[in-house]
Image: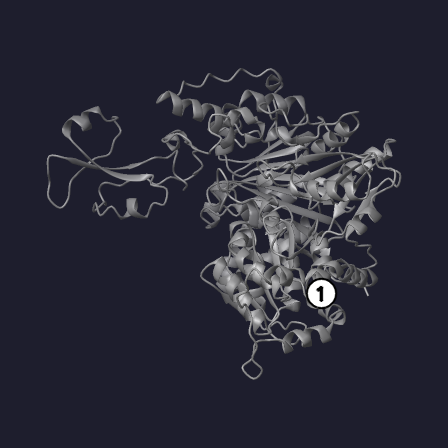
């Protein structure tokens, strides 16, 4: 029986499965794992029953260490227990993980793998957190994309129950946890059929109970601890077979072919990549292209990382392989090589396969994008007689020269007919929410495949967001940023004046839409010469829309996202506009129905307005040879700060940090920066800015107190300061008692966030 399809991200897929097998969820939120716990909490509150006919008991603790302790205690009491975490949160659970594994308690930790803070905090994805748990005794199972999370997460729960080994079930933070795809989801009846109830009953019977007390966690001396520690070996030796048993059960239900290691590519490949996580989907695209052009390459996907099964690995490895690149998404400073490399090297050595050339590559730290150009570079390096034994991809290392040159322009490897759309928004402006809504409308109301991924600035609210949306008639396996888009939208006009490189991502003949209040003449003034020339040379279809004033006119204030969503459907040609309007209005009714008919009607008006408000700009021929931009005034201030702002912070603020080489950071490898740089960050992202009315002001300073970005500031000015101030300054006598000072409330429009 076919499974129901639904648009969801990897977090929701993991939560859907976890809820089915869980009695107790002990949680503490940490990005990007928080939505998993949130879903479970919502479903429990709504009365959803798991496969045992119960609602999950959700307990939020005061820290991740507390959550881990609660997991341990709950398991000891005989409850199947789950938690959701990542990064430092996972590391705080490590002491309890040793105990849980050694006591053979069957639980699952769902981890959206995230960078562990080093020279700086990074909230995005790599495998440094899960690799830090290799010694705990937890089994480690990895998935590549949201569909695999849905398909294989049950294996983690089922194998833990039967094999008496807890499982760390992980997938790439953000790239998989937050990537929306239309996937098939499990019916709980199917999941219940696969459970070993005898093993569950045995686990519950071993629970700590005053009716039949036992002792756990005792103290052991050096005479017996070692022997006792080795007594668990058979469980780990047997565990890969238990995992494969449940993969086979999943395969029987779904018609899939999941194994501990899955190979994809030419059966007689001479060069392969070995990796875990979302990079495997990128590799598959590149493999399809290269093999279609006469090459023989492949990828060996690691699913069960711990316990490592050399037998299963060697069984999946093509016998024709001569060169292997092992890709690790972590950095272990000072190590001979990174973790996955060491496992593969040991396996090949013990099997006597010493004639295979192996090299280790590092990629994707902190969610560094890994596009096909990076994977092409790996296969190209493997063509050499003596490929680099250690390398990095996706960056330019001009210090230790480890990086491989990217293959650019890389061939287009995405599914034929895929429509790619990119949106530049401001954190908190509704762009991401609207794009999630659009994606689900298209995914749930058409036969199209979908993918939505959201690139966030660490500032979150007030930072830059870039939405990457793909739609097509063929499956989409492209877990990397869009850089050849059919449609690009700029939802904040400040990005134009800041010189962000947005239109350069539009394909020749594609559409570029700017939300602004400018006339065509004003737009010509604001666009820089590079953007104008690209538009003219590549026949870009340029549109503007004034959603800012339109939202105010409708009564929606700053909320332009509904208008802009409607404009997207009008210009992007993904589905008929009449259908899109119908589905957008249905979604608005569902979202805002509780707030009354007036609010619903306001959203209807915004949807209708977006269809009609787009304006086509006629691109003049003069843009092919535009007037050069005026030189920027030199920055003033302390030389060391000015140097840092110019060389580091300006490219980073323009979302061009990917272009910076390793040498740009060689002066501060420890992450220490000069103070005072914030004074140079004048982003000007607010389209509405407050003004001070001295007639009505009672000088309470509450406005300055509540301004979250400190852009409203009161001043007491002396007579000399008043004379030196700009002529248009507003002043008032001080209250309640006049003094020799004048009072003014100053607003910094370039710092204001509106």
Question: What residue is pinned by disc 1?
Answer: 163
Residue 77, position as x, y percentages in the image: 57, 74
Residue 750, position as x, y percentages in the image: 39, 33
Residue sitting nearer the eye, 162 or 674: 162
Q: Residue at x 58, y 64 (%)?
A: 40
Q: Against 235, is 745 above or below?
A: above
**123 sits to left or right of 693:** right
Figure quadrant of the N terminus? bottom right
Residue sitting nearer the eye, 572 or 231: 231
Residue 137, position as x, y percentages in the image: 63, 57
- Asked if one can make out residue 611 in the rendered structure from this viewpoint, the answer is no
Residue sitting nearer the eye, 599 or 414: 414
In which quadrant of the rendered view does residue 610 lie? top right
Residue 111, position as x, y percentages in the image: 60, 54
Q: Residue furthest bottom?
A: 211
Secondary structure found at label 1:
helix
């Amino acid at each position: 029986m076919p499974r129901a399809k639904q648009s969801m991200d990897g977090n929701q897929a993991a939560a859907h499965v976890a809820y089915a097998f869980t009695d107790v969820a002990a949680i503490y939120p940490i990005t990007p794992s928080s939505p998993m716990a949130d879903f479970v909490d919502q479903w429990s509150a709504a009365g959803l029953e798991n496969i045992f006919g119960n609602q999950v008991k959700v307990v939020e603790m005061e820290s991740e260490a507390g959550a881990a302790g609660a997991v341990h205690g709950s398991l000891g009491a005989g409850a199947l227990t789950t938690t959701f975490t990542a990064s430092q949160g996972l590391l705080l659970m490590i002491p309890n993980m040793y105990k849980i594994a050694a006591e053979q308690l069957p639980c699952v930790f769902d981890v959206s793998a995230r960078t562990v803070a080093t020279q700086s905090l990074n909230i995005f994805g790599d495998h440094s957190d899960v690799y830090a748990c290799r010694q705990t005794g937890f089994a480690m199972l990895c998935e590549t994309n949201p569909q695999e999370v849905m398909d294989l997460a049950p294996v983690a729960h089922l194998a833990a129950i039967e094999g008496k080994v807890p499982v760390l079930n992980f997938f790439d933070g953000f790239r998989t946890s937050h990537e929306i795809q239309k996937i098939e989801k499990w019916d709980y009846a199917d999941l219940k059929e696969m459970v070993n109830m005898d093993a569950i009953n045995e686990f519950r019977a071993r629970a700590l109970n005053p009716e039949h007390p036992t002792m756990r966690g005792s103290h052991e001396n050096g005479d017996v601890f070692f022997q006792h520690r080795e007594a668990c070996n058979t469980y780990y030796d047997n565990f890969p077979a238990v995992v494969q048993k449940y993969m086979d059960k999943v395969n029987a239900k779904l018609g899939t072919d999941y194994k501990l290691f899955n190979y994809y590519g030419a059966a007689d490949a001479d060069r392969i990549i070995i990796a875990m996580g979302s990079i495997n989907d990128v590799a598959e695209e590149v493999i399809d292209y290269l093999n279609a052009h006469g090459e023989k390459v492949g990828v060996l996907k690691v699913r069960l990382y711990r316990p490592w099964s050399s037998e299963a690995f060697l069984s999946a490895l093509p016998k024709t392989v001569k060169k292997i690149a092992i890709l690790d998404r972590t950095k272990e400073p000072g190590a001979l090589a990174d973790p996955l490399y060491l496992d593969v090297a040991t396996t090949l050595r013990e099997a006597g396969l010493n004639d295979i050339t192996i090299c280790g590559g590092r990629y994707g730290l902190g969610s560094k994008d890994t596009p096909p150009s990076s994977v092409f570079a790996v296969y190209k390096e493997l063509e050499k007689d003596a490929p680099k034994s250690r390398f990095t991809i996706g960056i330019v290392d001009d210090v230790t020269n480890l990086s491989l040159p990217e293959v650019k322009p890389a061939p287009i490897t995405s599914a034929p007919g895929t429509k790619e759309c990119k949106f530049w928004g401001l954190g908190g402006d509704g762009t991401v929410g609207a794009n999630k809504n659009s994606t689900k409308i298209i995914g749930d109301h058409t036969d199209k495949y979908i993918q939505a991924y959201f690139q966030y600035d660490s500032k979150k609210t007030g930072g830059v967001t870039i939405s990457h949306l793909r739609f097509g008639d063929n499956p989409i396996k492209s877990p990397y940023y869009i850089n050849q888009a059919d449609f690009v939208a700029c939802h904040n006009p400040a990005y134009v004046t800041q010189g962000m490189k947005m239109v350069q991502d539009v394909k020749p003949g594609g559409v570029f839409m700017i939300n602004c209040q400018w006339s065509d003449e004003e737009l010509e003034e604001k666009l820089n010469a590079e953007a104008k020339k690209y538009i003219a040379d590549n026949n870009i279809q340029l549109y503007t829309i004034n959603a800012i004033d339109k939202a105010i006119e409708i009564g929606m204030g700053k909320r332009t996202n509904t208008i802009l969503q409607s404009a997207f459907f009008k210009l992007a040609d993904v589905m008929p506009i009449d259908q899109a309007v119908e589905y957008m209005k249905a979604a608005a009714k569902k979202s805002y129905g509780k707030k009354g008919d007036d609010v619903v009607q306001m959203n209807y008006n915004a949807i209708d307005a977006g269809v009609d408000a787009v304006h086509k700009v006629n691109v003049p021929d003069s843009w092919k040879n535009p007037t050069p931009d005026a030189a920027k005034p030199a920055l003033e201030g302390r030389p060391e700060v000015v140097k840092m702002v110019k060389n580091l912070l300006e490219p980073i603020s323009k979302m061009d940090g990917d272009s910076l080489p390793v040498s740009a950071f060689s002066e501060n490898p420890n992450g220490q920066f000069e103070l005072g740089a914030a004074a140079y960050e004048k982003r000007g992202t607010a389209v509405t800015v407050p003004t001070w009315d001295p007639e009505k002001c009672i000088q309470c300073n509450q406005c300055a107190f509540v301004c979250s970005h400190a852009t409203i500031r009161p001043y007491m000015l002396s007579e000399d300061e008043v004379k030196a101030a700009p002529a248009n300054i507003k002043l008032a006598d001080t209250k309640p008692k006049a003094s020799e000072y004048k009072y003014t409330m100053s607003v910094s429009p370039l710092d204001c966030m509106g």
